[in-house]
Amino acid sequence: MNGISSIWFISNVELLWRMVLAVVLGGLVGMEREWHNHAAGFRTHILVCLGSATIMLLSIYGFSEFVAEVNVRIDPARLAAQVISGIGFLGAGAILRNGSSIKGLTTAASIWVVASIGLCVGAGFIYPAFVATLLVLISLLLLNKWEKYLLRHRRNNDVTVKAHDDPGMLGNIAYKFSEQGIQIINVKMTHDLDQMDDEDGRAKTQFYFNLQVKDRNKILLAVEQIKGLDSILSVETSPGHDRVRVHQRLPM
């Protein structure tokens, strides 16, 4: 009986070891996120991993005094299940949407997997916790670079052109892109009828181009040609290059 019930008890040294290990493993993943300036970084991942490990320890060993009670059933997974479902609110907070692009999904996934690592550590499932941490770091560090290399020709770039609302302006801009071999994926146009030019009363138009190109330097070449067109007010590119805004020179 004592041998069976001993599985529900743990020494303070073992408790400390598991909690410290959770801090270390969570910190390793969080350090990578912090290094790349993501929403959830070093401390967040440490707290998630430590919290998960603590809850797992509580779930297994926190109610050991009631093991011998009649009609009491110990379920070590009852609190762990709540961690898996409850960690979603942190992941949702890391996801940001900017127009058509969504950022933070990888960070949200890292928070979720760090929670699972913490549960493994708390349950004494040490080897899988180390393996999971190693695989997460490989995914975030090595596979991230490999993915960028494979998709280097498929990344889209956004260009915003502000111009006077003249006939044929869209076609002229699109021709400059095609000259550089740039493929237009999508284009949107908005009219600024309320903001008339003070000189000739012409309305302003904004064109939003989503482009795909193998050599991103060609976008800058196209921008230089577009700003030379008549009626162009400004050209803004992102995120393919460091956010650059080019204004047309005003006539002297």
Image: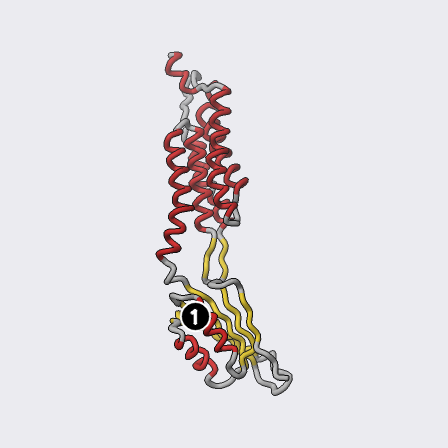
The picture quadrant where one finds residue 232 is bottom right
Q: Position of residue 127 (x, y in %)?
A: 37, 30
**Quadrant of the frame with the N terminus:** top left
Q: Position of residue 42 (x, y in %)?
A: 53, 41
In the image, what residue occupies the spot 43% across and 35% down? 117
Q: Of 111 and 42, which appears nearest the observer?
A: 42
Q: Position of residue 104 (x, y in %)?
A: 47, 51
Please identify the residue farthest to the bottom as the structure is shown: 200
| Left or right: 127 as drawn, with respect to 159 | left
Q: Of 211 and 84, which appears nearest the observer?
A: 211
Q: Secondary structure at mark 1?
A: helix
In the image, what residue occupies the spot 52% across and 77% down? 227
Q: Of 58 and 148, which appears nearest the observer?
A: 148
Please identify the residue farthest to the top as the structure is shown: 2
Total numbered labels placed on residues in the image: 1
Considering only vertical position in the picture, is 218 above or below 46? below
**Quadrant of the frame with the C terminus:** bottom right
The picture quadrant where one finds residue 74 is top left
| Left or right: 231 as drawn, with respect to 125 | right
Residue topped by disc 1: 218
Q: Amino acid at mark 1?
A: Lys
